[in-house]
Amino acid sequence: MQGVDVVANILKQENVDYLFCFPANKLIDAAAKIGIRPILTRTERTLVNMADGLSRISNGEQIGVGVVQAGPGSENAFAGVAQAFADSVPILMLPGGIGRRSGDIPTNFSAVKNYDHVTKWVAQANFADRIPGLMRRAYSLLRSGHPGPVMIEIPTDVGEEEVDDFTYTQPKAIKSLADPQNVKSAVEMLLAAKNPILIAGQGSLCATATPELIQLAEFLQIPVMTTMGGKSAFPENHDLALGASGHTGTGVVKHFLSQADLILALGSSLSQSTFAPRIPTDIPIIHNSIAEVDINKDCTVEVGLMGDTKLVTQQLIDEVVARVGAEGKTENASLKNEIQTVKADWLSEWMPRLTSDEVPINPYRVIWDLHKAIDRNNAIVTHDSGNPRDQMVPFYETLIPNGYIGWGKSTQLGYSLGLTMGAKLAAPAKLAVNVMGDAAFGMAGLDLETAVREQIPILTLVFNNSALGGYEKHLPIATERYGTKFLTGDYAKIAEGLGAYSEQVECPNDIIDSIQRAQKVMADENRPALIEFITREDAVFSYGH
């Protein structure tokens, strides 16, 4: 068999169902020949975003795989891989490459050279008989340690090279516990603290640690906030939940983070950036991460707990039980009442926006009504970059793990469309919804046709305010003199032309009905839907710090 057949057969052994791809690459046919379904997108970035979404929602059961052609395919895929790297998502990229005889010619794009700083590991398969070993290393890295994209470039001549026979052993995930002495020190600090706070990050979702997080929070009677990436790791209707915080966040997070005397961060990198919660620097921090490079990176850490978040959280639970008994600490009714009161006060300030009847529609009203229009226990919702992210993170209340995909360490407009398609393929029984602005749709919207053609029934909500929200502060002269922030377009008509069900909504009282109509069409006809809401700009945000 040829080298591409070896790769395809290994992917089959790894239970790969979908190959997210754009031609021309012989690996696509080799995979299709043995029953791996190719999903062909309009742009390379979207196929990488789809692989990303599938990996996130599969929780390790499947890892998204992207295949592109040598040269322009590798060049065009860069943005998607960079986004997955920034957001720590494991995906396997298998780009084609220029034949080995021409690989050193400067005009030829080298994936190995150019992707080195946006992948966990990148290599070239320089001989076909090396492919099994390289693939085994790739999957070992994808399953263990800090998550991130892995890439193997397969030159054209290597893909066509004959291989007599091969064996492949599927690598297992490697998970580690934290130092037991550090666990004891952490619990001592937690039990002594008067106002501790638990921060759950994206690693909590990757480790499927939600049951353990709930148990630990209840045992310690500790309030829980999530990062933007960790949003949905802890149910936000729980009486110890504070909500999420990143660039924006709930007023409840702001209140409790400001008075905390100890931070327990689980499954978080604690990276400090525009889109991360602002961590107090004058209180002790207990920090769990799967990666040693995170600990003592941006924050001074009192106790480090390196290891898998699910296992480490269970270690903490066991130590709490050993010290205070099987029931944990006595219920703190005062704390729970304080959370409820602060939350009610914060929401009351925002109700005029969340329930606004103004026309054009206030975007906060769409987010608030989305709660009522869908079953949040059976849905996956995500934002896009910019204002939709800043408006949704505080106010969309999540109930189940992976019921929300929070992202944004890199902030590429249009990312949510491919992300949602991949999520839907990973969880076909769930409603998959992405909320994007008109600028984001302009970046990626034509790939809605991919969802139509491949029968991936996702629901896209477009906030059309005919503007690049917030950009005028960066370009005040260009905006005033040349109107650079203003956009035009009828996105419902575009969606209709691409074959999706579509509506344009201008009245706030039609929000819920339009979302429910779209869901019915999606269920009956197995096709995607797009609702374009004509909205006003609202540049007032809830900051969680």
Image (cartoon, rainbow, N blue to C red):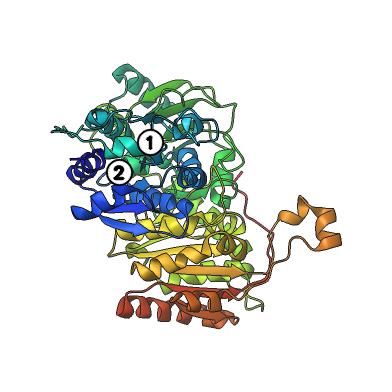
Residue 80 seen in this snapshot: yes
Instruction: Find residue 163 and report its horizontal and vertical position in percent.
Output: 18, 34
Above or below, 145 relative to 39: above
Give the CA distance from mark 1 to mark 2: 25 Å
Instruction: Find residue 385 and report its horizontal and vertical position in percent.
Output: 57, 54
Instruction: Find residue 365 and report its horizontal and vertical position in percent.
Output: 57, 71
From the viewer's side, name the closer residue of 76 and 292: 76
Above or below, 214 relative to 282: below
Q: Secondary structure at mark 2?
A: loop
Quadrant placement of the N terminus: top left
Label number found at residue 208: 2
The 10 Å Cα crowd at callout 1, few under 14, some 14 to 19, many 20 or more, is: many
Quadrant placement of the C terminus: top right
Q: Earlier in the sequence, mark 1 or mark 2?
A: 1
The 10 Å Cα crowd at callout 2, few under 14, some 14 to 19, many 20 or more, is: some
From the viewer's side, name the closer residue of 186 and 273: 273
Which callout, 1 or 2, points to the residue nearer the camera? 1
Describe residue 218's horizontal placement relative to residue 467 as left or right: left
From the viewer's side, name the closer residue of 221 and 201: 201
Instruction: Find residue 381 and report its horizontal and vertical position in percent.
Output: 43, 60
Above or below, 29 relative to 437: above
The residue type indicated by label 2 comes to Thr
Q: Secondary structure at mark 1?
A: strand
Q: Quadrant of residue 541?
A: bottom right
Describe residue 363's horizontal placement relative to residue 448 as left or right: right
Q: Kindly identify which residue carries mark 1.
A: 151
- The answer to whether marks 1 and 2 mark residues whose Cβ atoms lie closer than 8 Å is no
The residue type indicated by label 1 comes to Met
